[in-house]
Amino acid sequence: MFIIALAWWLLAQSGTTETFTRTIDITERGEAIATILAACARCSWAETGREAVALRLSVDGKYSQHILLVRGEAGADYSVTLGELSPGRHTVAIERDPELSASSAGQATIDGIGLKVVARDLIDDWTAQSMAPILHARPNTVGKFTDLPVLMWYEIVPTPRGRQFRYSVIFTNEDGGTATDRLMATWGRTTDIEFVYGAEIDAQGAVVAEEFQGPGHEVPTFKGRHEGRHPLLWVSTDNNMVSESGSTSVRYAPAPERAALRDVAREVVMDRHPWSYRVAAQEMQREGKIVDDAAAGSGRIPDLRRFVFVEACTELENAAVVFAVRVLENGAPRWYDSDRGLREFRVARSGCFRGAVPVPATASAPDAVRFRAYSLPPKDGQTPGPASVRLTRVNRVFVLGDYYAPRPSTYSWIGSVVLPVDGDWQVVR
């Protein structure tokens, strides 16, 4: 079975996190995952001074990590990696960190804490948990409630020598890199999703290679330190690349989940956790990036609930693709193009992607989608190779509801349509 030990402690009544301690007995060695059910009175990730309470978690008196209660006043689950625990008695302690908590955030409460331990004989699950990265905070985010790593997932990819375990992280935003409006047009989100670490395992289970995504999106060999088998990484750039060392001691360890991303975009991990859309929107509000009449190219966006999100898949070479959605506005049909007239808002990567385009608040739900292909301009004086775009899937077309959770998709399609480069729009049915 997946879990060799499972324990839950439900409090008779909510308790403050100033001093929260539980002693647990482990019967077999394994990788431990804690799930903490917590709430935060008066917390709002959207409001300066009330963003979150920071909890400091320790195991057997040793600092493990911080947990920021970003999901507000309602009770919510926060799952984190604790590392390897040996058989015997262990103490998990959680306390409020006043220095890293928002000044006007209210009292935090913990309604329950659960623990599961993954056995070594569950090879894939144990291997994935045992190598999950521990992320140290970027120095300019400590106490600033920005670019917080909230979700982690891994994929298992075959290699000539065995398999690679690839770990990616979803941050609430990125303070550097792509502008917010371009992010929405070409990625369909304001979160930042980054591959951070990969480990190749041979048939005998030995680690034969490690890598990480460093500054400049370079992927060098990882030669840094480990805690047990967990690599220690430091978020080091404003677009959330990582390094093998750093100056901060505050760290995070969200428990990784497995994701199979064939024929889907990476953003499906966000779909599993609809609250991630709300947290992302709240960070945009707090940072002043939400403006009702935001123009394309301004770096700002209108309310995220005005966007239509499209997930599609293409086989693309030396070209870019744009989609448009049709809505009814004052009873008349009108198309809204995802590039909004800007070349840099076009999607120029092959595979499955998400994008989003804003429509008027009074518009109807989208009832049609179309696509168009464009050639790429010469780069550095070089002429691109032959251009081609084949559309193979439209997985989802959706909008966000009142609380920013994705509503059910209104459209999907699977087929094969060649989009003429620099040609006309193609409506898919």
Image (cartoon, rainbow, N blue to C red):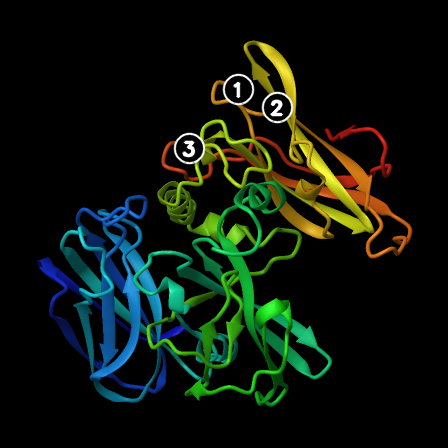
Q: Tell me where residue 334 appears, x and y as whole percent.
A: 64, 18
The number of numbered discs placed on residues in the rendered structure image is 3
Q: Nearer the viewer, residue 86 or 59?
A: 59
Residue 401, numbered label: 3
Element at label 2: loop
Of callouts 2 and 3, the N-terminal one: 2
Residue placed under numbered mark 1 in the picture: 364
Residue at 31% across, 53% down:
70
| Residue contact between numbered discs 3 and 1, judged by CB atoms under 8 Å | no
Position of residue 8 in the picture relative to residue 123 (left or right) = left
Residue 367, numbered label: 2
Element at label 1: loop
Residue 133 appears in the figure? no
Give the distance between the C-alpha atoms of the residues marked 3 and 1, in whole angstroms: 13 Å
> Which of the image's four quarters has the N terminus?
bottom left
Q: Residues within 10 Å of mark 2 (few under 14, many from 20)?
A: few
Residue at 30% across, 77% down:
64
Element at label 3: loop
Residue at 58% across, 16% down:
328
